[in-house]
Image: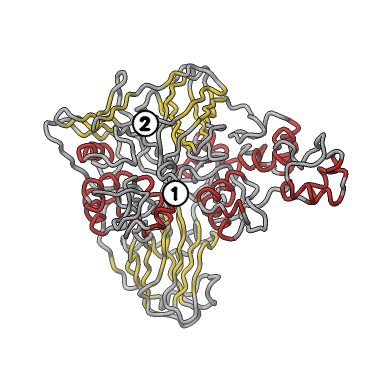
């Protein structure tokens, strides 16, 4: 699924929650809280084992927590056919891929317990500035009133503010400031933090601090944030400026109409405010005018094509004096024409720079090269800050490219519009634009099943039925040992790129139950197998294929998004390779930090995992999100007496929950065994402001 395509912005957020509403907590995240506070938090986040509309925890004289578990649906005993057993019952033909909306922000209220704790989740009607008091911490909903001003509407700092609202497009959020803004006229508005000094996040709520979430974004452009919202004249919204990973600092908040923006800044709309610059950029990349003037247009092409966007004394444009701002480029050009250094860096010198200097040629982020950094400044910053400074200091090598492929939208391929996939937007620009006019998140984050459903719902395009001509069984979204059977007599009905012709096969359709990494394997089979995965149907692209002579077990590992359909073909490795097969589909090993949200399913402690999943089963079948971490803080001994993140100790994890979760994403052993010197080094690297040199 990864390719060298350009896209509009980074994937929305680093971690998606199911709950799409903002929940206020009195105790800042990342700081261990008292048992009473955590019990309060559980009442909001996890009493129902997930998110459901109109769920209320009633006020009573005693604290009571009941729940239904979590969203895994009904369980049906397997049915057995003479040939194949399928986890949820075998059925022939192509199964329905299914569609659904991304999250729901219903009305959820945690009532008071013994008169001591009161909390309100988003969607609850409030009067005035209600307060949530937990362990002496108080949050007063008092956003700064911006009126109806447009442009750069506010500047300031989040340093010293509190962390009261959970921003659900950020795995590790930070302190925030809230603003109330009223639309002067009905229209679409771009709200962004472009110009801020730190890694921001942005959330927009309807009406007040507890209203329905309208939009959320983590990174757009150079780690700043931007959203599109439709607002009616006189309607008031609340804008929340937050940060990623504990980040805070000086922010700039901008609110503008849908007109094309500054050529030197990323924007949601096609083109920019300078016709000459727009013409030059769109001649190189027409999508900058037909789609969005995104980070590629503004930060990659414009600085090398438009003088107003270039750095001072840029080698790519004429200068009054000799020389330019890149010593290596200056040396190369002046070796050809000494006057470029001795007298004036004129147009001829700039033309030579374009021919000789990489500084005037955007470098591909998605392939290795001998230069430092790459042509997309947003991707460059992501790789060099989150992976390895080497990529910007020494050389952009294979390891830099691998991280870019997994984390930079510029290296991610857009997929078919009618199916959920990992792309941002979809491969038909007109269809994508039509959907994103109503659902802008589809062009900021992954193309979810809700985006795919909107193609027909909004009449943006037509979706043909999936090609199920090769499919024998529908596996639904089952996990574990999903099918057993025999390929004897199944017939050779297709060709796999990783196996010789002649092998007999069975084909299965399967739907990813969550956004995650999945392993497909044939462990337990008694013959030489080959395994292929296609997206989205029998006629789709083969996105994974493994088969080797003499090797019974085949394994394919893929990153998929929730609702993404695939067709799995299990075949004998060549003619005569027949026998009994086993097909397994599993999630990643449970290596994440138990005491906070992490990217895995389950967590590193089996005992803690069992305790938490008894309360909320979704923690072991979907993602170990923040609500699972909150339960662990109450239920698990491994989360008691956490020690300093900046010193080594024998116990797993550390006392700053956000920091521990970040470190353990890079080094899982830090949360499964002890907090070693390596863990401390990661804490210095990735935890902003936690450990000081």
Q: Quadrant of residue 490?
A: bottom left
Query: Are there few (<14), some (14-19), or many (20+) residues within 10 Å of tag 2?
Result: some
Describe residue 654's horizontal placement relative to residue 406 as left or right.
left
- Of 451 and 60, which appears nearest the observer? 60
In this picture the colour scheme is secondary structure
Please, what secondary structure does the residue beneath circle 1 have? helix
Q: Is residue 23 visible?
A: yes
Q: Give the image location of residue 8, x and y in percent.
A: 58, 42
| In-front residue for pair 271/540 | 271
Question: Residue 228 in the image: x percent, y percent?
Answer: 52, 31
User: What residue appears at the point 50 percent right and 56 percent down from the top-left corner?
Assistant: 536
* Side (left or right) of 115 relative to 594: left
Tag 1 or tag 2, which sits nearer the N-term?
2
Up-down: is 148 above or below 118?
above
State the image coordinates of residue 386 (x, y, percent, origin top left). Answer: 50, 49
Q: Report the Cα–Cα distance between label 2 and label 1.
A: 23 Å
Q: Residue furthest front?
A: 693
- State the residue position of label 2: 162
Q: Is residue 100 visible?
A: no
Does 516 sit left or right of 149 as displayed? left
Say if mark 2 contacts mark 1, CB within 8 Å.
no
Q: Residue at x 40, y 34 (%)?
A: 175
Q: Which residue is mark 1?
A: 684
| SS at badge 2 | loop
Relative image position of residue 666 (x, y in whole percent):
43, 55
Mark 1 residue crowding within 10 angstroms, few (<14) / some (14–19) / many (20+): some
Residue 28 numbered tag: none
Of 601 and 419, the residue lying toward us: 601
């Amino acid at each position: 699924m990864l390719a060298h395509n350009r896209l509009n912005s980074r994937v929305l957020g680093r971690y998606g929650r199911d709950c799409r509403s903002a929940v206020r907590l009195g105790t800042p995240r990342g700081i261990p809280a008292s048992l009473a506070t955590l019990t309060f938090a559980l009442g909001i986040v996890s009493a129902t084992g997930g998110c459901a509309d109109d769920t209320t925890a009633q006020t009573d004289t005693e604290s009571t927590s009941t729940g239904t578990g979590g969203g895994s649906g009904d369980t049906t005993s397997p049915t057995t056919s003479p040939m194949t057993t399928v986890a949820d019952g075998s059925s022939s033909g192509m199964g329905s891929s299914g569609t659904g909306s991304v999250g729901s922000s219903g009305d959820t209220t945690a009532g008071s317990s013994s008169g001591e704790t009161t909390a309100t989740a988003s969607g609850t009607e409030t009067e005035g500035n209600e307060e949530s008091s937990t362990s002496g911490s108080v949050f007063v909903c008092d956003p700064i009133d911006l009126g109806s001003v447009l442009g750069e509407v506010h500047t300031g700092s989040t340093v010293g503010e509190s962390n009261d609202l959970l921003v659900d497009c950020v795995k590790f959020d930070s302190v925030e400031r809230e603003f109330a803004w009223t639309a002067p006229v009905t229209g679409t508005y771009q709200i962004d933090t472009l110009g801020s000094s730190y890694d921001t996040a942005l959330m927009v709520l309807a009406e007040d601090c507890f209203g329905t979430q309208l939009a959320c974004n983590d990174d757009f452009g150079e780690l700043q944030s931007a959203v599109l919202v439709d607002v009616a004249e006189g309607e008031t919204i609340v804008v929340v400026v937050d940060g990623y990973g504990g980040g805070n600092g000086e922010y700039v908040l901008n609110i503008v109409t849908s007109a094309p923006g500054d050529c030197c800044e990323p924007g949601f709309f096609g083109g920019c405010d300078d016709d000459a610059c727009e013409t030059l950029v769109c001649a190189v990349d027409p999508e900058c005018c037909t789609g969005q003037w995104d980070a590629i247009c503004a930060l990659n092409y414009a600085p090398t094509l438009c003088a107003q966007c270039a750095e001072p004394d840029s080698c790519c444009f004429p200068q009054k004096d000799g020389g330019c701002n890149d010593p290596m480029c200056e040396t190369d050009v002046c070796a050809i024409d000494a006057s470029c250094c001795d007298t004036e860096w004129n147009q001829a010198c700039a033309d030579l720079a374009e021919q000789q200097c990489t500084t005037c040629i955007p470098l591909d982020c998605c392939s290795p090269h001998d230069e430092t950094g790459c042509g997309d400044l947003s991707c460059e910053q992501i790789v060099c800050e989150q992976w390895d400074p080497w990529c910007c200091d020494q050389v952009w090598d294979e390891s830099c490219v691998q991280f870019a492929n997994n984390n930079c939208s510029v290296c991610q391929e857009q997929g078919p519009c009618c199916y959920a996939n990992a792309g941002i937007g979809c491969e038909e620009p007109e269809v994508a634009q039509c959907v994103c006019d109503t659902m802008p998140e589809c062009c900021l984050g992954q193309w979810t099943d809700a985006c795919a459903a909107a193609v027909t719902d909004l009449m943006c395009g037509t979706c043909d039925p999936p090609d199920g001509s090769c499919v024998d069984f529908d596996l639904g979204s089952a996990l574990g040992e999903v099918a057993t059977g025999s390929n004897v007599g199944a017939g050779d009905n297709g060709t796999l790129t990783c196996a010789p012709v002649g092998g007999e096969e069975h084909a299965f359709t399967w739907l990813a139950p969550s956004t995650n990494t999945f392993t497909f394997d044939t462990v337990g089979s008694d013959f030489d197998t080959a395994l292929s995965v296609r997206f989205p149907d029998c006629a789709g692209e083969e996105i994974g294929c493994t088969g080797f002579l003499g090797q019974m077990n085949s394994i394919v590992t893929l990153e998929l998004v929730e609702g993404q359909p695939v067709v799995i073909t299990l075949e004998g490795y060549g003619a005569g390779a027949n026998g009994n097969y086993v097909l397994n589909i599993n999630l990643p090993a449970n290596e994440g930090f138990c005491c906070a949200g992490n990217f895995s399913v389950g967590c590193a402690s089996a005992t803690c995992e069992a305790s938490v999943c008894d309360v909320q089963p979704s923690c072991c079948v979907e993602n170990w999100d923040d609500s699972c971490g909150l339960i662990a803080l109450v239920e698990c001994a491994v989360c008691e007496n956490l020690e300093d993140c900046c010193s080594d100790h024998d116990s797993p994890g550390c006392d700053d929950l956000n920091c521990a979760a970040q470190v353990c994403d890079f080094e899982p052993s830090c949360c499964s065994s002890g907090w070693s010197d390596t863990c401390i080094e990661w804490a210095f690297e990735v935890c902003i402001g936690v450990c000081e040199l």
